[in-house]
């Protein structure tokens, strides 16, 4: 039995159909080293490809969209050319009856690049440069919010897309008819974040020695609270308290202390063996309708688990257990929010599940922490090293693009 094998060649025959390249792919000979895009009468250059892993132009905190545009065609037909940086939020909740996608404009900034009457426009066939700073903060319904990173969250029941685009628009007029020639270029905004102060305090030592300086709480608070249960075991009132610093760098260990009332003799090892700790990445999406009686959809993902490393009895008789849990992978986690519309939070969740048949209660306690991409001083140090070019948080690339 013979099998037919088609012949292959480097070029397509005249009778074959071929796929044309998209204009956004960059069709010039320099597209492998620079971000270049073309329309019928414009060639846009957004500069060199600085970041190897990025599939689109990528900008960091306080970055600037900088480039040039070359025009072609009849000069007397061009009325003006402008560049706009746009940020938008697209959300949907699958449980909602209409299943609609809601789009909110987070930001839009436009600058003129060329017009025949605009001072400093230069010759029509020259390279027209432009520079558009990316704001670090935006105003949302009267409040101020940090500009969020590019994010693509697609989970069961919850979809969220924070996207950025550069729109280059040419207004042309010919024989009394106005034409708009434009191109929409997707870009990535990946700002780095740092703790608000240098270094984390020694939370464990401060708590155990009762030497915590409460005057520093506004800068770097330690959150101490209890989830209490009316359960009596061995004539003791049981409760679980978790203490943890409020800000941590992704990839670093998060120290925490779990405290109990005095534990009966022989129960310490049981308690220690049944304490679990993990950090959860929690995404909350506000429903489009404020009249909805349903709770806002929440998606959670465990990014790391921890362990208890030490235990003892404090001076006041409380039993304490010291542990650590890693704040995800280095550079790949960041806490952020967009007003009250979307929240990306990190939660330290500690629980105690006693063995079957034990008289001890089930206990659970969670504490919100802020996770940053980098330690203090990183942003300024990299700015100095790269001559003022902000380095994007490339660890967030996977979360910024569809998989």
Image (spheres, rainbow, N blue to C red):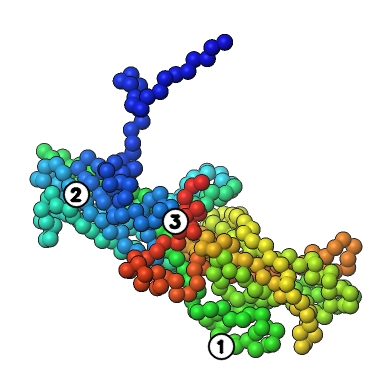
Q: 374 above or below 185?
A: below
In front: mark 2 or mark 3? 2
Quadrant in which residue 275 is drawn: bottom right
Q: CA distance from mark 3 to mark 1?
A: 36 Å
Q: Residues within 10 Å of mark 2 (few under 14, many from 20)?
A: some
In front: mark 1 or mark 2? 2
Q: Which residue is mark 3?
A: 150
Mark before the other along the chain sequence, 3 or 1: 3
Q: Is residue 42 visible?
A: yes
> Hey, which residue is sitting farthest top in the picture?
1
> What secondary structure is marked by label 1?
helix
Residue visible at 40% across and 64% down?
A: 391
Q: Residues within 10 Å of mark 3 (few under 14, many from 20)?
A: many
Q: Which residue is mark 1?
A: 215
Mark before the other along the chain sequence, 2 or 3: 2
Image x and y of residue 124, in percent:
12, 50
How many numbered discs sit on the rendered protein? Answer: 3
Image x and y of residue 175, in percent:
11, 38
Residue visible at 54% across and 56% down?
A: 285
288 or 261, which is in the foreground?
261
> What secondary structure is marked by label 2?
strand
195 or 353, which is in the foreground?
195
Residue visible at 26% across and 43% down?
A: 28
Image x and y of residue 385, in percent:
37, 70
Q: CA distance from mark 2 to mark 3?
A: 29 Å
Q: Which residue is mark 2?
A: 70
Q: CA distance from mark 1 to mark 2?
A: 58 Å
Numbered tag placed on residue 325 in the rendering:
none
> What secondary structure is marked by label 3?
loop
Left or right of 116 in this view: 342: right
Image x and y of residue 8, in percent:
40, 23
User: Cβ–Cβ below 8 Å for labels 3 and 1?
Assistant: no
């Amino acid at each position: 039995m013979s099998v037919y094998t088609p012949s292959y060649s480097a070029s397509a025959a005249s009778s074959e159909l071929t796929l044309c390249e998209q204009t956004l792919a960059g069709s010039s000979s320099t597209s492998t080293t620079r971000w270049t895009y073309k329309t019928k009468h414009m060639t846009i250059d957004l500069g060199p490809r600085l970041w190897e892993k990025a599939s689109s132009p990528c900008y960091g905190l306080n970055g600037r969209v900088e480039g040039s545009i070359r025009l072609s065609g009849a000069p007397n037909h061009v009325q003006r050319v402008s560049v706009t940086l746009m940020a938008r939020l697209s959300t949907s909740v699958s449980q909602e009856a209409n299943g609609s996608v809601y789009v909110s404009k987070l930001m839009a900034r436009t600058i003129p690049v060329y017009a025949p009457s605009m001072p400093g426009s230069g010759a029509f066939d020259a390279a027209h440069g432009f520079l558009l700073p990316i704001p670090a903060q935006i105003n949302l319904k009267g409040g101020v919010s940090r500009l969020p990173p590019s994010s693509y969250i697609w989970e069961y029941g919850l979809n969220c897309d924070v996207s950025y685009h550069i729109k280059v628009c040419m207004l042309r007029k010919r024989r009394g008819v106005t034409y708009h020639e434009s191109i929409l270029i997707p870009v990535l905004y990946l700002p780095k974040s740092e703790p608000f102060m240098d270094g984390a305090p020694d939370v464990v030592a401060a708590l155990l020695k009762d030497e915590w300086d409460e005057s520093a709480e506004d800068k770097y608070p330690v959150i101490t609270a209890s989830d209490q249960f009316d359960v009596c075991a061995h004539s003791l009132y049981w409760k679980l308290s978790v203490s943890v610093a409020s800000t941590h760098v992704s990839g670093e260990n998060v120290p925490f202390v779990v405290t109990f009332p005095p534990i009966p003799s022989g129960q310490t090892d049981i308690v220690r063996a049944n304490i679990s700790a993990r950090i959860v990445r929690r995404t909350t999406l506000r429903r489009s309708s404020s009249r909805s009686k349903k709770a806002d959809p929440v998606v959670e993902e465990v990014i790391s688990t921890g362990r208890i490393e030490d235990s003892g009895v404090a001076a006041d008789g409380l039993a304490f257990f010291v542990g650590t849990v890693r704040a995800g992978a280095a550079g790949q986690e960041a806490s952020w929010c967009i007003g009250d519309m979307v929240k990306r939070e990190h939660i330290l969740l500690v629980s105690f599940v006693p063995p079957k048949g034990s008289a001890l209660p089930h206990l659970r306690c969670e504490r919100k922490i802020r996770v940053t991409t980098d330690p203090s001083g990183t942003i300024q140090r990299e700015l100095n090293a790269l001559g003022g070019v902000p380095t994007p948080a490339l660890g967030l690339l996977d979360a910024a693009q569809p998989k």
